[in-house]
Image (cartoon, rainbow, N blue to C red):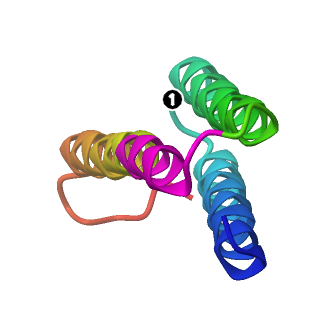
Amino acid sequence: MTAEEHDALIQSLADLQRQIGDKTREFETRGEFAELRDAFVADLKARQAAIRGRIDAALGQGFSWRLIRTEFERDFDGIFGELLRWEKRLDAATMARNPAGQSPV
């Protein structure tokens, strides 16, 4: 793995962590579904940490960049997809609770 590839991988993880943080703050601001939100965010953070741990372990054991990148992309896509699905479920639930389009905040 080149230094540029390593840096891009670390940046992608940092971006994912930032997106999780942004969504967490958005959910907190909305003040809805607190118990579900907290469990969901904890799960996302644990998955992100697990990805980072697997990448660090793979790098330490000398695995090829191609294998690491493939695994990372699969895991990243899964977490990002789950984040988008969660956001859609929250939006739908909010609209159902506020059919006139009134903001819950």
The image quadrant of residue 31 is: top right
The image quadrant of residue 66 is: bottom left
- Where is residue 8? Give x, y as percent: 66, 75
Give the left or right position of residue 92, taking residue 25 as reference: left
Q: Which residues are magenta?
A: 63-74
- Residue nearest the observer in this picture, 98 or 75: 75
- Residue nearest the observer in this picture, 91 or 41: 41
- Where is residue 37? Give x, y as percent: 56, 30
Q: Amino acid at mark 1?
A: Phe
- Where is residue 57? Give x, y as percent: 76, 30
The residue pinned by badge 1 equals 33
Q: Residue at x 66, y 67 (%)?
A: 15
Give the left or right position of residue 33, taking residue 61 as reference: left
Q: Is residue 65 above or below residue 11?
A: above
Q: Is residue 47 above or below residue 96?
A: above
Q: Report the predominant secondary structure element of the magenta stretch.
A: helix
Q: Is residue 103 magenta?
A: no
- Where is residue 54? Give x, y as percent: 67, 29
